[in-house]
Image: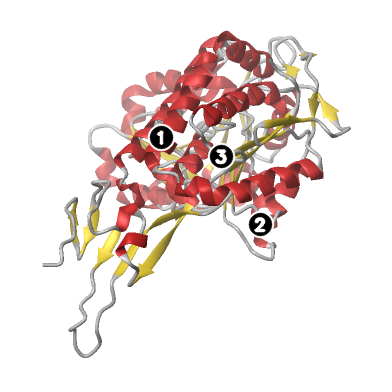
Amino acid sequence: MITGKNYIGNQQSAKGEVTFKTFNPQLNVENKNTFYEATSDEINNAVSLATKTFKEFSNISGLKRAEFLNAIADEILDLGDELINTYCSETGLPAGRAQGERGRTIGQLRSFATLLEKGSWVDASIDTAQPNRAPIPKPDLRKMLTALGPVVVFGASNFPLAYSTAGGDTAAAFAAGCPVLVKSHPMHAGTGELVASAIIKAAKKTGMPNGVFSNLNSSGIEVGTQLVSHAGVKAVGFTGSIRGGRALYDLASKRKEPIPVFAEMGSVNPVIMLPKSLENRANDLAKTYAGSITLGTGQFCTNPGLILGIKGDGLTQFISELAAQIVQIDPMCMLHPNIVGAFEINKEKAISQKDLTVVSDYKDAVETNFARQVVTTVSGQTFLENPTLHQEVFGPYSIVVQCEDGQQLETIIASLEGQLTGTIIADDNEETNFSGVISALQNRVGRIIFNGVPTGVEVCPSMNHGGPYPASTDSRFTAVGIHSIKRWVRPFSYQDWPNNLLPAELQNENPLGISRLVNGNQTKGAITNE
């Protein structure tokens, strides 16, 4: 049952006077539940609990933390239709999307549980002592990854489950041994509270310490600002706009003790369509990309907002067919009136730019909070000269850039800001003639795709979801998959430490049976005195 209260550890609390409601964009009405924004006292209490809990939770065995993660998955499933119905009422998205995202969330939790059960993720490295080494004896050194401390996770507007309360950031932080404070997203606070209740139940069932998790409601930026500024918080996870992510990054950098902010932000995900591919299958590509641009009403961080090609009959045909295909797709509801409003403002700003042509604009009447898809086109030179055209329009919008030649195409790619993805569409091995284009694209993105679409992020160890700024604040890390755990840890070394006082991961006997780098060799064996 939704109460509208905050979770301060395992206790519910509603001390504040600021309240708000979520909104059903499909029905264009407010939802019935009232939510209480967290007060400064509630925020301080939540961080204090997390700080006190950190020492105990970070020292709980990986196997016990795996039980916790699996229990969260079980409790989310036990929420049943109430979770699905709440999700749909707060987003306007269909039940199938909610069920799919729930499945992804469950999969993420269980994948981190498996990682913990195997145990080798700590990257244990041991170099044993050489007391007789001349001219200076070598000490015994042992290194592993250790948890940073309490982590603040900001819920994402466009993924109420997979990137929010129990999403990838939270699952990775729990796996690392970090308590989590979620700043719930106001657009889906009810979904957030239900998932928070599942986490609290799982924590109690598996014996996790009180304060390992808190869920804080917020109608604006105040709660998030206080959390990021709090001395007890040691890292931040964020998925959202460049403006929001950069504000948090700057705030964290100005603290007396700066902390890392791992923000996944904007991306136009450039798609490069090489000439042969357009000559051979312009119509098929147009149909495929009309679907990709409008998928989820364009509300994915990997939406193809920028398509680049070289002038010619193939590109002309592609633009014509894309214009025809995209208006055949029925417009869909966006997540919230505020998001619809931002889409309309940014779309109008884009199409008002000099020398830009609108080639397709859905003109028929649409329901309230539904988005009309748009495709535009410009010359390569116009695109180079106007940075406004490089900016993301969050929603079903894409711009096709018509380049003069391969050199201009390469120049344009090199001028782009950092992106999550880049795509190469090629036929007849023509990609071998565009090595400079491919190299330039690799330098601007975190993931490169061949003959596909960027929409869709597979959750697996080999996925990289991040990229050069402003796609993310630190391109060395992924926000998806088990390797995202590395955002919430730091390396720590023990020198000449007594074996019985070392963590089990570093003890001579290797009681956990994990893979370790011992004197330069990867092994699961024990260390003997021989």
Vertical relation: 463 (above or below) 289 = below
Instruction: Of the two numbered discs 3 and 1 on the same chain, state the one appearing first in sequence.
Output: 1
Q: Name the residue carrying label 1.
A: 66
Residue 358 tag number: none
Q: Residue placed at 15% from the left, 62% from the top?
A: 528
Kind of residue indicated by mark 3: Pro
Q: How far, Cα to Cα, is label 3 from label 1? A: 15 Å
Estimate how packed mark 1 is, as few (under 14), some (14 to 19) or many (20 or more) residues with alpha carbons within 10 Å.
Answer: many
Q: Name the residue carrying label 3.
A: 209
Report the front residue among 481 and 398: 481
Residue 252 tag number: 2
Report the front residue among 335 and 82: 82
Which image quadrant is residue 492 in? bottom left
Secondary element type, mark 2? helix
Kind of residue indicated by mark 1: Ala
Estimate how packed mark 2 is, as few (under 14), some (14 to 19) or many (20 or more) residues with alpha carbons within 10 Å.
Answer: many
Q: Residue placed at 23% from the left, 69% from the top?
A: 128
Foreground tag (3 vs 2): 3
- Residue that sits furthest to the front in the current view: 500
Q: Residue placed at 25% from the left, 47% from the top?
A: 514
Residue 385 x/y as whole percent: 60, 51
